[in-house]
Amino acid sequence: MESLHPTTITDPIAREVRLAELELELDRLIAAGHHALAGRASASPLHPANTAGFLSYADGVKGLRAENMEGNWRFFRQEGVEGICNDNLKLRVLFANVFEACGERDPQARSRKGAGSERVAGGDLFEKAGIDLPDSVVKFRGDYKTYYLMVDQNGAMELSLPIVKAGGHFLRCIERIFLIDGSDLDEVEFGVDEPADDSDLDFVVTRK
């Protein structure tokens, strides 16, 4: 168990130092977020309602891997959860569409996170038992901490360390690193639900 005070990093110098500690680069993370925004923008009103969110999620994961798998970062896939992993630092980075990034309140995922996310994203065991602990007391599961590259529909991005609670929602963020506020991008909204991370799309093939 760790005693931590929730931290939000907005200062560019402090952000650079912290990202260096995580062996990540600002430009590469933003580039990964741009993959997600491009995927979302490729959806049209003629697509199913959740297409923009699914493409944003799928291309966000692709962007994480395409832009950041160098050095100690490698491909990560476990329990239906997709992203990148650094075994030396015991870190993972996943992707999430959120309602608002870089805001005053902790970001909330636009879609429920699956059971796989609860297991790999450090769920609070006391919270699941109905016991309220102070914000400064956190129980991480296992040896790894799971960050999310969080992108909203306006293009704001942050790299943050949330706890996923029972029911598939972010309980709170222990650390938030603001990357870009996205104020210069136009909003794209066709529906932004993404699939839960604990199940893949199932394709059924039958004989005619």
Image: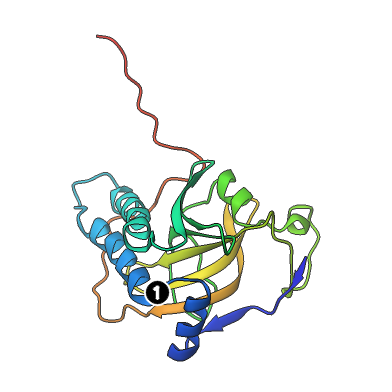
Q: Is residue 18 above or below residue 169?
A: below
The residue lying toward the viewer, choosing from 5 and 74, is 74
Work out which quarter of the rendered image holds the N terminus and state it: bottom right
In percent of width and height, residue 29 lies at 37, 69
Which residue is at a point 51% across and 51% down the rendered structure image? 112
Q: How many marks?
A: 1
In percent of width and height, residue 147 lies at 53, 64
Quarter of the image for residue 31 reads: bottom left
Q: How crowded is mark 1: few (under 14 residues within 10 Å), some or many (20 or more)?
A: some
Q: Can residue 64 be seen in this view?
A: yes
The residue lying toward the viewer, choosing from 183 and 160, is 160
The residue lying toward the viewer, choosing from 119 and 74, is 74
Quarter of the image for residue 130 reads: bottom right
What secondary structure is found at the residue carrying circle 1?
A: loop
Work out which quarter of the rendered image holds the C terminus and state it: top left
Residue 175 in the figure: left or right of residue 49: right
Amino acid carrying mark 1 in the image? Glu
Quarter of the image for residue 188 reads: bottom left
What sort of colour scheme is used for the picture?
rainbow
Q: Mark 1 points at which residue?
A: 25
In percent of width and height, residue 178 lies at 45, 79
Q: In this view, does 44 lie above or below 16?
A: above
Residue 183 in the figure: left or right of residue 6: left
Q: Can residue 167 be seen in this view?
A: no
